[in-house]
Image (tube, rainbow, N blue to C red):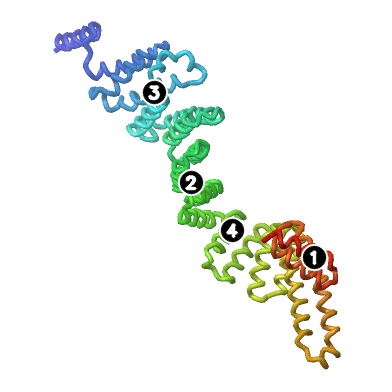
Amino acid sequence: MKNSLLTLAAAVALTAATGLATPALAQMSAITNAQLSQKAGQMDKALESINQAVASDKTKDKDKAKAWFTRGEIYAQLLNPATQALYTKYTKDMQPGEALQKAAESYNKALELDGPSGEYGKQVPAQLNTLYGIAFNAGVAGYQAKEYDKALSNFQLAAKILPQDTTAVLYSAYTQDAKQDYAGARATYNQLLTLDAYKAKPAPVAAYTRLLQIARQENNEAEAKKALQQGLAAYPNNKTFLLEDLNMSMRGGGTGNDAALEKIGKAIAADPSNANLYAVRGSLYDTQKKTDLAQEDYKKAISLDPTNFDAQFNMGIYNFNRAATLYTKASKMDLKTYQVQGKKVEAEGKKYFEASLPYFEKAQQIQPNDRNTVSALQKVYYRLGRTADSERMNAKLQTLK
């Protein structure tokens, strides 16, 4: 028996000495050779050995994770900014991003085989983060150089390395926007909204805003409404979305005044210094015959922005109509009643004409060729006895036909 054991030991020693290793030993040797070649900077030999190891079905299960992790390390070393220039001769025949893709592929395979708590698996997240940074920074460099195709491929690669990372996806969409690939940008913004990170919180407001703007550029009303509702659901007090919701409702004509007033009230709460909102709400109150509320809003609009044409004109119209009503009342009086009350009623009407004048004059300064304003001024000047001004407005009116 002793002689047999000695013979067996001698046979093993002879096998090792002559290089006639078992298949498993050979594949373990391939991993070791790859590591040694990598340390020596002989990356072509390192790649040859490690690709042999991962491709072989002779590699033991316990060594497979190590093989794939080592492959990731070798490809990652080709990308290391500190040493990248040394390895150009090994990467010059590779496709753009190939080394990065293979490094990520290798690390993920190691994680799959080893599990998150294994010797190699637990190292993978840090390695993937490093690869992500390389891809993302390359994307930023490409974007800044306006090399948008290069930037996009790197941002998309970064997103593949860390699939639930939001930044790379968002920057991919920004890049597609920059290269005017609006269909691609829309798809990427929508992809962003589906990420786990945004199931408990809203995506960046820019994503919803651009989806809305792209739909507007494409005259796609259905997509615009969808994007708007998504934006409002995520940011119910956002000024842009509230205003667009109001404008969309008023353009469509399907929203009643009460619903429109509710929407514009929310818009004003979000943007209280917006004169246009008060002017629009004043007009809505006018249609409901709520003249006191309308006047408050017109005056508020003017206080915020004296150049708001609608508010100035509508204040003029309010006073003009009051004056016209009083003059009409006086004109319908019989002689006896007129002799008693007529002059007083007309005097009151004249005050309203006078009150309308500064509003109409300001409106005409803002929009000199607005026919309705010029026509109203012609009538007011006439009623106030300013004949020359009335004739001047009448002459201007003829040029606007």
In the orientation shown, which residue stands out farthest toward the bottom?
A: 336
10 Å crowding of disc 1: few (<14), some (14-19), many (20+): some
Q: Residue 309 location, x and y as percent?
A: 71, 60
* Alpha-carbon span between mark 3 and mark 2: 32 Å
* Alpha-carbon span between mark 2 and mark 4: 25 Å
* Residues marked 2 and 4 touching at CB (< 8 Å): no
Q: Which mark is residue 391?
A: 1
Q: What residue type is labelled 1?
A: Glu
- Residue 119 seen in the figure: no
Q: How many numbered marks, from 0 up?
A: 4
Q: 224 or 140: which is nearer to us? A: 224
Q: Is mark 3 on a helix, strand or loop?
A: loop
* Residues marked 3 and 1 touching at CB (< 8 Å): no
- Among the two numbered marks 2 and 4 on one chain, the one whose residue lies closer to the N terminus: 2
Q: Is mark 1 on a helix, strand or loop?
A: helix
- Among the two numbered marks 3 and 4 on one chain, the one whose residue lies closer to the N terminus: 3
Q: Which amino acid does label 4 sit on?
A: Leu
* Alpha-carbon span between mark 3 and mark 1: 80 Å
* Residues marked 1 and 4 touching at CB (< 8 Å): no
Q: Which amino acid does label 2 sit on?
A: Ala
Q: 182 or 85: which is nearer to us? A: 182
Q: Is mark 2 on a helix, strand or loop?
A: helix
Say if 157 sits above or below 265 in the image.
Answer: above
Q: Which of marks 3 and 2 is in front?
A: 3
- Among the two numbered marks 1 and 4 on one chain, the one whose residue lies closer to the N terminus: 4
Residue displayed at 73% across by 72% down: 318
Q: Residue 54 location, x and y as percent?
A: 30, 23
Quarter residue 390 falls in = bottom right
Question: Which residue position holds label 4?
Answer: 242
Q: Residue 197 carries which label?
A: 2
* Alpha-carbon span between mark 1 and mark 4: 45 Å
